[in-house]
Structure formats: C-alpha cells, structure tokens
Image (cartoon, rainbow, N blue to C red):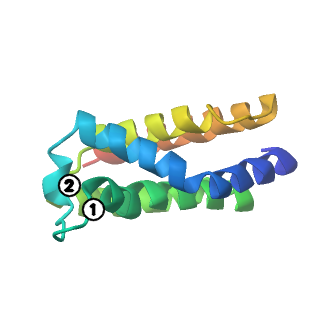
Amino acid sequence: MESVAATRLADQLRSQQQQLCDRVSSRLLAAYPELTRTLRLEENYPPIARLSEVAVERLNDLVRSVLIFDLPSLADQELRWAHGVLPRSGVTAEHQASMVRWFFEEVRKLPLSTMEVAISREIEQHFLVQIRQVHQTS
C-alpha cells in the first residue's frame, strides 16, 4: 500500500468521520430496522447516533489503523472477535458486509486521488473476504 496516499486517506477519514458514520448508520437502520433492538437504546438516545458510535465509528477507526500501520491483519483480528460476539445480539454477516460496502461507497464520494480510491477498494475487499471466511468457518 502506498504510504503517502494511505496517510492522506486516513486523514480524510478522520476529518469526515461524523458525516461518514451518520450516513452509513442511517442507511443501515433504513435497510435493517431490526438492528434497533440490538442497540439496547437508552431513552433519548437516537438509534442513528448509537449505531454510529458502536459500529460505524469503530469501523472507521479500524480502517484508519489499517491505513496508518499498513496492517490488514488488524481487521482480521477484529472480525474474528466480532464473529464471536455480535451474532448473540442478532448481528449477521449480511449486516457486517453491508456496513463495510456502504462505508466504502461513502468514502469514495470524498475527493480522493486515483491511488486513494485503489487503496479503499483493496481494503474493502480484504474486509469482505474476511467476513465471508469468518462466517463460513463457524
């Protein structure tokens, strides 16, 4: 992964985090309203904000870490952990894969260089392959 482009992309993800996370959270809740039940919402805590906090912001931070450290294995570890925990709350591989796809769709709406787009596609594919592998081995 080209380090200058990866660093620029990580910076964009940091600066655009709230907008990215809100858009992806909205889309997830619209497509999968059943996720609302898994959030254990407190009264007066909007579902979009809660989903953003517990899922999409975490994904954003993980992608940034992969970019900064050039360590895709960070995602592997996180996805294996998630597979052991999230299904108990009703979160499926489909939910996870949709979040990843929609996150990267939003990322690619940012003003990115050709290299940054290529890196985003590479990381997205890595995440999607890992999600499939983790769920197939169970």
Foreground residue among 19 and 82: 19
Q: Which x, y percent locates residue 20?
A: 52, 46
Residue 57 showing in the rendered view: yes
Report, in whole angstroms, how far the alpha carbon at label 2 lies from the one at label 1.
Answer: 7 Å
Task: Name the image quarter holding the N terminus.
Answer: top right
- Dot 2 amino acid type: Pro
Q: Secondary structure at mark 2?
A: helix
Residue 110 numbered mark, or none: none
Foreground residue among 60 and 21: 21
Q: Which residue is mark 2?
A: 87
Q: Nearer the viewer, mark 2 or mark 1?
A: 2
Residue 70 showing in the rendered view: no
Going 49% across and 41% down the picture, which residue do you hit?
A: 103
Foreground residue among 37 and 59: 37
Going 63% across and 61% down the picture, which residue do you hit?
A: 65
Foreground residue among 83 and 53: 53
102 left or right of 49 in image: right
Q: Which x, y percent locates residue 60?
A: 54, 55
Q: Which x, y percent locates residue 40?
A: 16, 66
| Label 1: how many Cα within 10 Å (few below 14, some 14–19, many 20+) | few
Task: Using the rendered view, name the quadrant where residue 115 is placed.
Answer: top right
Taking 45 as reference, is 94 above or below it?
A: above
Task: Using the rendered view, name the quadrant where residue 24 is placed.
Answer: top left
Going 53% across and 32% down the picture, which residue do you hit?
A: 105
37 left or right of 24 in image: left
Q: Which residue is mark 1?
A: 84
| Label 2: how many Cα within 10 Å (few below 14, some 14–19, many 20+) | few
- Dot 1 amino acid type: Gly
Q: Which x, y percent locates residue 76?
A: 49, 55
Going 62% across and 31% down the picture, which residue do you hit?
A: 109
